[in-house]
Image (cartoon, rainbow, N blue to C red):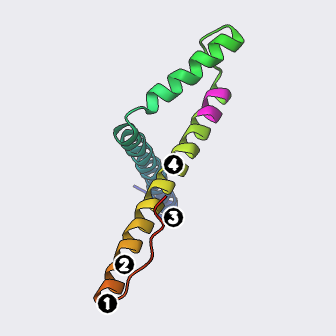
Amino acid sequence: MAFQPGANIERLVKDNERYHQAKVYEQKSKESLLVGRWHEKQYRVLNCATQVMQDRKVFHMETHGSGEMDAPQEMSLELSMAAKAVVLQRRAKLKSLFEREALQFEQELSAMGLALAKNNP
């Protein structure tokens, strides 16, 4: 068995390439997992995420004559619906945050013996 010069370097390069491929695969798997969890959460929270998409498909079918959408249209539609869902969630969270802060502020004023004048319509 003869010693080949540079064999250990070739083996190291192959091992590093294999580790790199494994790391890329791991990152893609984690990304897929996160996307799947996000979609599941959207379905649980909104309880109508698929219905909204179905309504859009019905509209598309009525205007274009077929129920099938090509991939770029479907992806852009899904992204726009996801963006709208994010905006709705942010608004709801901000509203609850403002309500909690207002209640906390009111309690702090009450502790000091002060109060806010409330406008009742």
Q: Position of residue 96 (x, y in %)?
A: 40, 61
**Which secondary structure lies at badge 1?**
loop
Badge 2 amino acid: Glu
Give, as a three-letter code, the residue at label 1: Gly
Q: Secondary structure at mark 4?
A: helix
Within-10-Å neighbours for mark 3: few <14, some 14–19, many 20+: few
Which residue bears the numbered disc 2? 106
Q: Which element carries disc 3, helix, strand or loop? A: helix
| CA separation in Å, label 3 and label 1 | 78 Å
Point 45% across, 67% down: residue: 98
Whichever of callouts 1 and 2 sits on the residue coming sooner in the sequence is 2
Q: Looking at the rendered structure, which numbered label has been put on residue 9?
A: 3
Between the residue at mark 4 and the residue at mark 3, the CA separation in whole angstroms equals: 55 Å
The amino acid beneath tag 3 is Ile
Of marks 3 and 1, the one in the foreground: 1
Residue identified by numbered label 1: 113
Instruction: Estimate the spatial distance between the alpha carbons at disc 1 and disc 2, rounded to whole Å.
Output: 10 Å
User: Observer-nearest residue: 59 or 98?
Assistant: 98
Residue 121, given in percent of the width and then of the height, sits at 49, 58
Q: CA distance from mark 4 to mark 1?
A: 37 Å
